[in-house]
Image: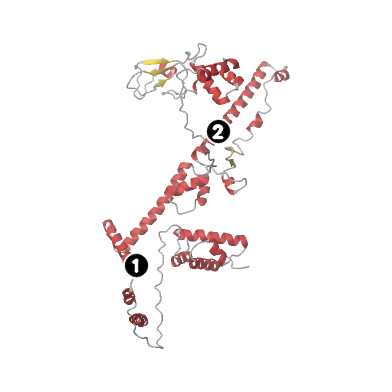
Amino acid sequence: MEYDDDALDAFGTKCRACGLPLLTPWIRCAAEHCQPNMNICIQCFSLGIQLEQHSNDHPYCVVKLEFPLYEPSWTATEEIRLLEAICEYGLGNWPTISTRMRTKTPEDCERHYFSCYVDNPKPPLPVFPDPVINKGAPITYKLSDNPPRPAEQTALWHEMGGYSAARGDFNIEHDNFIEMDICQMSFEDEDEENMEGEEEGDRNLFTELKLAALDVYRNSLIERQRKKKIVRDIGLINSRRWYGFVKRRFDLSFSLDAMRPFMRLFPSLTFDKYLESLSYERQLKSDISNLQNYRHNGIVKLRSVKTYQALKQRREFLRTQRHLMSDVLLHVKDEVYFQTWLSKQASRDGAPVALGNTLPPLHRKPVPRLKIENLPGYEKLNDLEKELCSEARLVPQAYLDFSKILIAENAKHGCLKLAQARSLIKIDVNKTRKLYDFLIMQGHIVKSL
């Protein structure tokens, strides 16, 4: 059975039983305990369909739209079809609107619309409140960054698949050359003259082939619009925004650029599960490392962890409260450091220090090494890189990013100087020097040509 899209698509009403669009007349259940808008088509009603709370013995009413609203010659179905055609083809395109109406001339459509909807509108027409406009205030225009508008042939332009944000369309469409199949097609009388010698069946077959080609073209246009809607709604155009969303959701320690090839291999739901599994794996590794640390410190029950954490924080706080007595206790067995401390005390009290008895200065306490086992990027480092990050107190992920920048700059110019490295990565100069020397030792960068 064929359904008239023009007659029913406007209502957005489907049969609750079979899900097909409703054609007038249809049946609406009038029972109070039935859910609202329980609409059923004539075919399902004739079969006695029962569903949810609706039973086939409930009272019902027949819904028809063949009644006039504003003029006796215009039914409600024609009113809806007229407004749909104006929205689709634009106001003023009356010949095309008349073709859509099928029963009204262009003059009738124009006269009826302006008479009933513009010049003398009659209720119940929707009334929209006028927006409050501050007269005299300038309107500031701001270019939207979503989706972004990169220059052509740039890296971001290629990532967006050739999407032109200025006109909201792609440079290459789905089935881009489908129009070539029907551009020479014609239904004029000259085609019939060329087939005068053919049989009537062959003519009908040729016409059906043309109609089938048009149907294929129409389905291709529908599929093209469907794919564009999916791309826009899901946000696949603005890839950077998607990256930010995934990072905030999963808190991943690895680069998403490395995961992009897997997006083509997995469906969307499978890829999300894959990222969740990687995030869960990282969490499990962190929990296992914490449990091993607790066990190493003699904790065998989880209820003792809270007390251990409180004592650890207290110990770390007291360790920062250093004074001279802590120096004495630290070097009490070292005679040289002990004499140095006595010399300091004597100088503070004003006692003279014997000449020629030069004591070595008190060395600073060495900076403790950084524990990087549970930090992001630890799994990607080798043993030498782990040693460097721990000694230089560098976060593994920061080391990977900084080394990538320096190696890329070295590949670009053929060499890299220390001053250039310090200008590229804005961190402590001592850390920069250690990282720079390490990359030279490993052969990743060259100091000079």
Placement of the C terminus among the 4 image quadrants: bottom right
Q: Which residue is mark 1?
A: 320
Give 53 or 91, whichever is nearer the viewer: 91
Give 27 or 267, whichever is nearer the viewer: 27
The amino acid beneath tag 1 is Thr
Residue 390's image quarter? Answer: bottom left
Q: Dot 2: what SS?
A: helix
Please rate how many residues cluster around mark 1, counting C-alpha atoms within 10 Å: few if below 14, some from 14 to 19, many from 20: few
Q: Position of 172 compared to 292: left or right?
A: right
Vertical placement of 338 versus 369: above or below? Answer: below
Residue 60, image x, y percentages:
37, 16
Vertical placement of 202 versus 301: above or below? Answer: above
The amino acid beneath tag 2 is Gln
Q: Is residue 350 visible?
A: yes
Q: Nearer the viewer, mark 1 or mark 2?
A: 1
Vertical placement of 242 versus 40: above or below? Answer: below
Residue displayed at 54% across by 36% down? 228
Q: Which residue is mark 2?
A: 225
Q: CA distance from mark 1 to mark 2?
A: 65 Å
Residue displayed at 59% across by 19% down? 99
Residue displayed at 50% across by 13% down? 71
